[in-house]
Amino acid sequence: MPTRPRPLACLLLFAVTTPATLLAQSAAVVQSPDGRLALTFEVAPTNPPSAAGQLVYAVTFRGKPLIDRSALELDLQGQRPLGPSVAILKQTPSQVDEQYRLVTGKSSTVRNHYNALRLDLEEPTGAGRKLSVEARVYDDAVAFRYVVPDQTALREFRLTKEATEFRISKDATTYALLLPHFRTMYES
């Protein structure tokens, strides 16, 4: 009588044989301190499927979309863009809740309260270039920035274009900040 494989053994075999696939499909979520605002990063599958994919992000408020899946990409002079073919290597969450004093302004103290996430990414093929994204989510705002770490695969580069997309959800309300020149106050 033939023996059937045990489910646990099959699961372990699957996990051992496909770590790159699982890594490429992982998502990273960071929420605001009050939990209403969420910023999600993920590696979207490419066609044909591979261990890497396009780095994308999305923003939701109370579960409703504000920014739909939007691509993150840096165009470099004389090189392939950085972002369309990456895998998430590491997620490092953190949080800050501090106050500082202002010399002038409407308030004498400001509360700096946010949850943060650092994503370390790498191209699994080719030169294996690395990229990091540092994100902060406040109760009323999200912010992120690109960090190109020091690495042998990318000693020098010239950024020709930041190709960050902002696919605003159809139900979102947006307001433009019209600044006629660089000396304009943001509060006006």
Image (cartoon, rainbow, N blue to C red):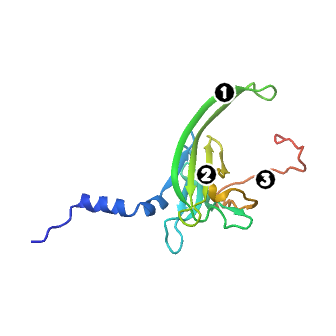
Determine the CA span between mark 3 and mark 2: 29 Å
User: Would residue 35 appear left or right of 169 to someone viewing this image?
Assistant: left
Element under disc 3: loop
Q: Which residue is mark 2?
A: 132
Residue 176: which numbered mark, if any?
3
Quadrant housing the C terminus: top right
Q: Which residue is mark 1?
A: 99
Q: Closer to the observer: label 1 or label 3?
A: 1
Q: Earlier in the sequence, mark 1 or mark 2?
A: 1
The residue most toward the bottom is 48
The three-letter code of the residue at mark 2 reads Ser
Residue 39: which numbered mark, if any?
none
Q: Closer to the observer: label 3 or label 2?
A: 2
**Image location (x, y in percent) of residue 111:** 66, 30
**Image location (x, y in percent) of residue 183:** 90, 43
Element under disc 1: strand
- Dividing the picture into quadrants, the one containing residue 76 is bottom right
The three-letter code of the residue at mark 1 reads Gln
- Dividing the picture into quadrants, the one containing residue 7 is bottom left
**Residue 181 appears in the picture as rendered:** yes
Determine the CA span between mark 1 and mark 2: 27 Å
Element under disc 2: strand
Q: Residue at x 63, y 59 (%)?
A: 153
**Residue 34 appears in the picture as rendered:** no
The three-letter code of the residue at mark 3 reads Ala
